[in-house]
Image (cartoon, rainbow, N blue to C red):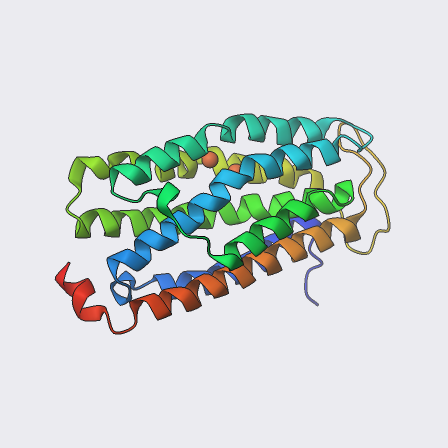
């Protein structure tokens, strides 16, 4: 008999499936020309830029819970993240990627607008959604650290690339793990089969099905977005391998 997973572990497992699939096209970065990798970093910046608004809106939604613990955690996360987009932007510019010069990629707009809307759903749904995006953030900083190192090496950017690698390292040295864990606490030891889990200590009353639904919808949107990013990257790098190798 397979073990019945709680809500935290269930969303974790879904996320693991999504991220292990999304890692595959990025295992061999020599497939892509430098322009494509720079483009990908600028698309990821869009998420970083909008993330503060998501956290803020999610915190407002979480204020409707019957304890303030989730709201407080999301506000803490919001405060930690505010200022990060500016750091990221400056670090990208140092290696020649100007996010201001970026042209809109519609699937990114669709993805971000969709997540934005979901931040206004039920509090339990939003808790699951934010837990899923914070879990994926670890994967993102890992893969974008690798992409950054690759781009910096191709451009022979040397020291100019240090803030960019440092930006990802900062997140990987505990920031994202803590964002994930501090939300995960609220989803621990609660199960899909329970209609409602009453508040206990600082944990609010939670509807497990809604939390699972939030996690699922968030992960599906992320998987869809990454699928579109990869398709575009393949198009952009088509027939340009000689160029990529020469850079
Ligand atoms: Fe950040
Ligand atoms: Fe985070």
Q: Is residue 205 visible?
A: yes
Q: Residue at x 68, y 43 (%)?
A: 119
The quadrant holding residue 231 is: bottom left
Total labels drawn: 0
Observer-nearest of 195 and 229? 229
Q: Is residue 229 left or right of residue 193?
A: left
Residue shown at 30% from the left, 67% from the top:
237
Report the quarter where the N terminus lies. bottom right
Q: Is residue 67 above or below residue 18?
A: above
Q: Position of residue 241 (x, y in %)?
A: 22, 69
Image coordinates for residue 96, horizontal then vertical, percent: 25, 43
> Residue at the location (21% across, 36% down)?
160
Q: Quadrant location of residue 52?
A: top right
Q: Residue furthest bottom?
A: 239
Q: Quadrant of the C terminus?
A: bottom left
Question: Foreground residue, 109 or 95?
Answer: 109
Left or right? Give the position of 21 relative to 236. right
Looking at the image, residue 12 sits to the left or right of residue 232; the answer is right
Q: Is residue 25 left or right of residue 97?
A: right
Instruction: Give the x, y percent position of residue 64.
Output: 80, 32
Is 154 drawn above or below residue 134 in the view shown? below
Decide which of 191, 92 is in the foreground and name it.
92
Residue 219 % position (x, y): 60, 56
> Is residue 189 in view from this perspective?
no
């Amino acid at each position: 008999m397979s073990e019945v997973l709680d809500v935290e572990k269930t969303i974790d497992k879904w996320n693991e499936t999504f991220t292990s699939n999304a890692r595959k096209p990025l295992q061999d970065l020599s497939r892509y020309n430098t322009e494509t990798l720079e483009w990908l970093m600028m698309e990821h910046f869009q998420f970083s830029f909008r993330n503060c608004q998501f956290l803020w809106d999610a915190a407002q939604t979480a204020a409707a819970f019957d304890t303030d613990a989730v709201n407080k955690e999301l506000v803490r996360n919001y405060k930690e993240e505010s200022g990060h987009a500016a750091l990221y932007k400056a670090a990208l510019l140092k290696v020649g990627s100007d996010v201001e010069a970026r042209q809109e990629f519609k699937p990114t707009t669709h993805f971000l607008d969709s997540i934005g809307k979901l931040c206004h759903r039920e509090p339990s749904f939003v808790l699951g959604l934010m837990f899923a995006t914070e879990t994926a953030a670890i994967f993102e900083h890992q893969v974008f650290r690798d992409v950054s190192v690759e781009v910096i090496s191709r451009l022979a950017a040397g020291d100019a690339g240090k803030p960019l690698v440092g930006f990802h390292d900062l997140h990987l040295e505990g920031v994202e793990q803590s964002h994930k864990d501090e939300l995960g606490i609220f989803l621990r030891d609660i199960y899909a089969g329970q209609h409602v889990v009453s508040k206990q200590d600082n944990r609010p009353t939670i509807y497990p099905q809604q939390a699972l639904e939030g996690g699922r919808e968030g992960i599906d949107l992320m998987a869809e977005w990454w699928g579109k990013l990869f398709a575009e990257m393949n198009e952009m790098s088509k027939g340009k391998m000689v160029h990529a190798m020469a850079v």
